[in-house]
Image: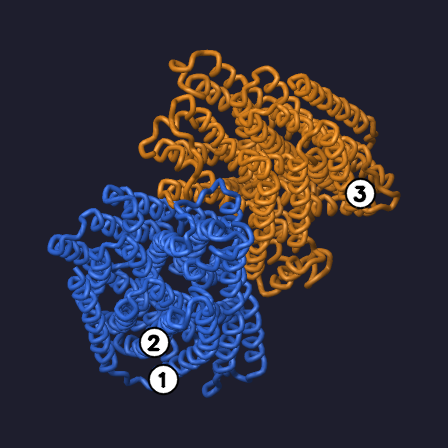
Chain colours: A blue, B orange
């Protein structure tokens, strides 16, 4: 039924454009909200300028990188151009550039709206929690709609024009490589500023968070935008594209066009459900923002389940595959809830860490690391169980359908990603709004409102991070299936034996697995050392300013710190540090592939997934746990603010910052990138390795 | 050639007995050294009593555990007794008890000599570094000889009497389960005491290490013995038995008796080489103890290489397998050297962490964690490379020989274990001697000598720990081979298909892998939380004593703290906390096996090895790194003792203590235990699982 497939492709394009239209409406709504306070305008303007400066500089660096890689792709992939001819390689290079470009545009849109929405939210907070929430949420939703719209549109267009799944992997690789560096760069920027601001401001001088005397305070707020908005958007853009691409690669190789239709249909419904969910988000006059955020997530989930059931019935899709998708979605939600247990301040882990902090910072660290390690279990079991369940549900349809089931479980888990991104981008916007309210001296009542919005943002953020890791885990298992699919297509063309398994007992596989497992460890270490080095540079600068700018410490009117210098240090350091770690992961993949061939790569990807998931969960969750323990103590428990216990908790939070906002979430992207590099280079690895 | 095999079995028994004889001679030599100082006698006596009390209580708890497991084995393993008959199950249960018993006896011997040698070393230090070194080293060597002698003797006797490799796995499981709890229990004891003593003594009151006013000081010294001597001995006993057992299981299934001979021949030569190495250890009058320890390791390595070459030539063994063993040994040494890079205070990582500590404890932790993560790479690549190399070297002999090659690489790596244990047990003995010299007021000159002995112990310890992890990694890969070997033997008996692979693309395998990877994380978290809880109890007790015992703080003559109370808390806590973590690992294995069958177990073991190696290396190395950074600062760098930088480094050291001495090394044993449980239960998993 090619006409049916075309129908779904056109529908996907139509709904993507609808999402863009909705995003434009939300954007104009946010823009219409008034800002009257001058100091908010001024400080907000500084933040906006800083964020755009960083983004521009980052994109200049990345465009060079993308250009070089595109050239390499053109020459070598999927096969050297002297063997393969011009067209396929050219298509691949263009698809790669398009993937990077779409991701960059979505990130840029996110920053544009986030750096307005923060001011609007702060200003609206003077009128109550309701308008403030709406400004923050709708600002975040622009990002959500833009990211998911762009990813669905991009995938659909590439598929429509090329009909070629390898080009799709090229598009996905473009998105991933941008995400890798945007996440790493943004993560280093934001944590450099955050740690330095806290260390010099809160700890050394005892001035409050977001105090305008602190030279790093603008950089800190810029960091929220470039790290948590642009970086996170690129990350989930990447996961979403990768999950669709993996499903499509497998669907095409299954040879039955109805499966391709199904992928587009489900992804489109996911976007539609997110549009409904965003539109439905409301908060009562004195309402609870956490409840509002969570309930719109549940609305989206329910709409997705219902509409896909109707579509499955109407278009005669396989019910078993529907079951796999729903299983993926449900497990995603469960992983989010268990993550919440480890990071919620009403639960035991956060309180135990707060209690342990009474004995000093070493115990804050030890207990936080311990709970972080414990927290990996439910998500690991969840990912494994959903893969196993999806496989078993779909196996009766045929052996090849089982892997398709896993990829559709990933698509199901990511179906509500539009809603997830909206919630996630809401966080840094209201965090910024809190900063603006503090710096603009809007009074305690406003601060109380922005605090309550911010705290909801933190709770929801922890859940969505767990969700993102789960989705990435399932996606890369599907990508492993896609890799094998690709290898077999190539092998068939070369007259080689079909590859049917990666055997653990084959020491080439095992060798690859051990190297693959070490890669995320080295990758995250390099990022954290980058933050460490950069923060030390910024700390010296802040100390210098307090020492040299007369009257700054005492808050003499008219004396302002040199904010730009701190932004410059954060920018320079982030751009300097973002390339090596990402390059290391890519080079490790290429080395293992040329040494051990596709078998070693199978092991490499597996080791990378296993240790990457473990480290990402550990780091994200213990980081969130420390953050919330500190906040719990600040709320008055275990001695409260300023006590020795609080100081110990601040040490935990400082360690947790690069864990949860730099290294942990970047690992997700690292896993996807090496999976895609492997798929793209499968022909080379198959034919040119030392051992095989 | 059964006569040849018998020759090697008898030779192994003979050389084991020779090792015992040598140990007895060393023991009597140590005992002959004089102790005249009364306070050394008194304090040394307290340590000896405390260590023996703990060991007795621990063995009582463990004997109950061993009894219950032996009963379960008798009823259910290798097959339920109503299916299998009495004899095989009874043999298995007896072999299991024997494994636990041999390990316990070796541990007891180690404690007996270590708690004398510490006094002798302290006393000898008055006469110079040379006699002090000899007392410490020969005391440690008693343990080395006893452990390796007992392991070779045990394996040989079990093989001789049963001729049954399954019984061998039972023996190995006995050794492992004792090691698991001895390592965990000893590790919790020692770090509870160490952390509490440091926190209350050094940090809160500013009194020096090993000050007799500190109520936890005796417990701390007892801890060195029960954790680092008895626990570590049980750990390496376990690895050594496991590597021999894995090699023998594979050799027997290869069907050619010359391979069995080869395993015994190489293991025997390894023990012989260690005897020579120990006998050759000498130090110049003003010599360098690190050099003395390292050079005897190299002597042992060279003798092993030479003698095995001669034996291979004389008995017509396969040269390729000799090559695999030597490769394993060389890689083991290389792993040790790279570990040294990350923990040596002359190298960049330690100095960077010391420098980072200037910005506060959060940076100590962040940079230490980062270098710890980086340090996993060389060892992971090394283990993978030696497995791959051994496989490729031996593959031309036939497909089955390739896995035998890997197991012989593990035997090669562990061949010098007698020497390694001697060096390792030397550490806590001289550490204790330092404590005795301080408490007995032997003067600065003596303290200087014991300090230099202690620092050599720390350097060598870091290397041997890297070595132990590498050996465990290779051993468990061999055990995975042994597991498959076992499964196939059973499958053949039941008329089932032969198992030839564990396919990563099979989601049951993947499911097992994810759960297996989470297990070491949960296991280590449980141990660290145990230390944390227990240390908090002991800290309260120490504070109580300083508060309530009048004159204690000021060191009034005649006022002594209640040492016993602290020993009691450490003992009670360790015994309380040691069972749950170990039991969790065993139960996880059994659950996965009954859910997913042998395929899931293949994945489970793989995930367990990969994440276990990663976490063990990360924890051991970052722990060692923090310890040495603190010592480096204490030597006067970055502000020196008492500075804020030093305080930050102490936080790092406190976090590192349970990393390197409780959780990290226990993971080794956990990996071995789950491998052995899997092999022993393979028949049940093959026939009674839900999915398969």
Q: Specify the farthest residue to the left.
A: A314
Which image quadrant is residue B302 in? top right
Image location (x, y in percent) of residue A283: 19, 65
Q: Nearer the viewer, residue B307 or A129?
A: B307
Mark positioned earlier in the residue sequence (2 or 1): 1
* Residue in the picture at 28% in, 57% down: A252
Decide if residue A458 is on the left or right side of residue B37: left
* Residue in the picture at 32% in, 68% down: A425
Q: Nearer the viewer, residue A497 or B495?
A: A497
- Cα–Cα gap, marks 2 and 1: 30 Å
The residue wearing badge 1 is: A39
Mark 1: secondary structure: helix
User: Can you tell which mark lies on residue B292?
Assistant: 3
Decide if residue A457 is on the left or right side of residue B417: left
The residue wearing badge 2 is: A105
Image location (x, y in percent) of residue A454: 33, 66
Tag 2: Cα neighbours inside 10 Å, few (<14), some, or many (≥20)?
Answer: some
Q: Nearer the viewer, residue A343 or A24?
A: A24
């Amino acid at each position: 039924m090619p006409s049916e497939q075309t129908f779904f492709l056109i529908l996907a394009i139509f709904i993507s454009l609808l999402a863009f239209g909705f995003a434009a409406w939300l954007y104009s709504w946010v823009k219409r909200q008034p800002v009257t306070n001058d100091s908010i305008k001024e400080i907000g303007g500084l933040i906006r300028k800083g964020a755009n400066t960083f983004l521009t500089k980052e994109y200049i660096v990345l465009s060079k990188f993308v250009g070089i890689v595109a050239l390499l792709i053109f020459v070598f992939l999927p096969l050297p151009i002297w063997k393969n001819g011009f067209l396929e390689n050219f298509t691949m290079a263009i698809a790669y550039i398009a993937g990077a470009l779409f991701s960059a545009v979505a990130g840029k849109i996110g920053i544009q709206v986030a750096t307005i929405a923060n001011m609007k939210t702060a200003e609206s907070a003077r009128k109550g929690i309701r308008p403030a929430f709406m400004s923050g949420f709708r600002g975040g939703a622009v990002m959500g709609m833009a990211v998911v719209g762009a990813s669905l549109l991009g995938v659909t267009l590439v598929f429509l024009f090329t009909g070629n799944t390898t080009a799709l992997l090229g598009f996905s690789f473009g998105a991933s490589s941008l995400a890798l560096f945007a996440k790493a760069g943004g993560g280093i920027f934001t944590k450099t500023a955050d740690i330095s601001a806290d260390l010099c401001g809160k700890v050394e001088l005892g001035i409050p968070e977001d105090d305008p005397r602190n030279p790093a305070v603008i950089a800190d707020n810029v960091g929220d935008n470039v790290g948590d908005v642009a970086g996170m958007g690129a990350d989930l853009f990447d996961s979403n594209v990768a999950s669709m691409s993996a499903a499509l690669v497998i669907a095409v190789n299954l040879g039955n066009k109805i499966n391709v239709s199904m992928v587009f249909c489900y992804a489109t419904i996911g976007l539609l459900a997110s549009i409904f969910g965003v539109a439905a988000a409301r908060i009562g006059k004195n309402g609870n923002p956490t409840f509002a955020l969570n309930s719109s997530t549940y609305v989206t989930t329910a709409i997705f389940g219902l509409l896909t059931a109707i579509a499955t019935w109407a278009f005669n899709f396989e019910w078993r595959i529907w079951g796999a998708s729903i299983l993926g979605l449900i497990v995603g939600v469960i992983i989010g809830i268990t993550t919440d247990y480890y990071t919620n301040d009403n639960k035991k882990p956060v309180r135990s860490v707060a209690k342990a902090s009474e004995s000093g910072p070493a115990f804050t660290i030890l207990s936080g690391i311990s709970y972080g390690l414990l927290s990996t279990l439910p998500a690991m079991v969840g990912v494994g169980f959903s893969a196993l369940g999806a496989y078993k549900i779909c196996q009766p349809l045929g052996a090849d359908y089982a892997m398709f089931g896993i990829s559709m479980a990933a698509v199901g888990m990511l179906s509500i990603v539009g809603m997830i991104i909206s919630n996630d981008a809401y966080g840094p916007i209201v965090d910024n709004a809190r900063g603006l309210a503090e710096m603009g001296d809007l009074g305690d009542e406003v601060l109380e409102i922005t605090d309550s919005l911010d705290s909801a943002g933190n709770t929801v953020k922890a859940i969505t991070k767990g969700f993102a890791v789960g989705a990435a885990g399932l996606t890369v298992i599907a990508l492993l299936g896609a890799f094998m699919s690709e290898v077999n297509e190539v092998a068939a063309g070369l007259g080689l034996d079909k590859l049917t398994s990666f055997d653990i007992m084959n020491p080439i596989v095992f060798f690859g697995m051990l190297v693959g497992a070490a890669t995320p460890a080295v990758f995250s270490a390099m990022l954290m050392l980058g933050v460490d080095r950069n923060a030390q540079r910024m700390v010296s600068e802040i100390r210098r300013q307090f020492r040299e700018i007369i009257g700054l410490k005492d808050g003499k009117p008219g004396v302002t710190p040199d904010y730009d210098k701190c932004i410059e240090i954060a920018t320079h350091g982030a751009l300097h540090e973002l390339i090596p770690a990402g390059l290391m992961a890519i080079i490790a993949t290429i080395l293992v592939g040329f040494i051990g061939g596709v078998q070693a790569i199978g092991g490499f990807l597996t080791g990378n997934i296993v240790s990457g998931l473990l480290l990402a969960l550990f780091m994200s969750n213990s980081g969130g746990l420390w953050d919330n323990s500190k906040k719990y103590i600040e709320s008055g428990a275990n001695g409260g603010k300023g006590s020795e216990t609080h100081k110990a908790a601040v040490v935990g939070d400082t360690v947790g910052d690069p864990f949860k906002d730099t290294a942990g979430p970047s690992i997700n992207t690292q896993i996807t990138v090496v999976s895609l590099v492997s798929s793209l280079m499968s022909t080379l690895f198959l034919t040119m390795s030392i051992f095989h």
